[in-house]
Image (spheres, grey):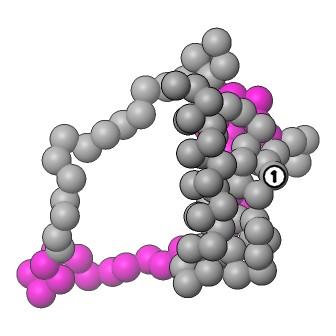
Amino acid sequence: MFGADHPEAWVPERARLQLDLRGGEIRTIVWATGFRPDYGWLQVPVVDEKGRLRHDGGVVDGPGLYVLGLPLLWRRRSTFIHGIESDAREVIDHLAGYLAVRR
């Protein structure tokens, strides 16, 4: 089956929903930008020879796989928080159709 041989996802026992920044536990925040994605952990054949996801507007070349936030997904602003809403709507529309067929 497609993607059957994959490592089990790590899920924290208890999600931390709030942080008290006044308590002194957190003194540094690293805001990571300008990185290159690495999809090597995906155990499904959905990357090209350069290691990029094969997709069309966020619909990945694998059943039920979708992405958001990649450059020029549907629009120039796809990688920005304020620009992802339109792309998310496109992906959600496709996903809804995909799920309707699988019922």
Left or right placement of residue 39 versus residue 50 in this view: left
- Segment colored magenta: 20-47
**In the figure, is residue 8 to the left or right of 84?**
left
- Between 63 and 98, the one nearer to me in the picture: 98
Quadrant of the image containing the N terminus: top right
Type of amino acid at the residue the image marks with label 1: Asp
Q: Residue furthest top?
A: 1
- Residue drawn at 43 percent across, 26 percent down: 8
Which residue extends farthest right? 49
- What is the secondary structure assignment of the residue under circle 1? strand
Query: Is 58 included in the stretch rendered in magenta?
Result: no
**Which residue: 66% across, 49% down?**
94
Residue at image mark 1: 56
Residue depicted at x 17% and y 83%: 21
- In percent of width and height, residue 24 lies at 14, 81
Residue 23 belongs to the span the image colors magenta: yes
Most extreme residue toward the left, as rendered?
Answer: 23
Q: Residue 76: x and y, percent?
A: 77, 80
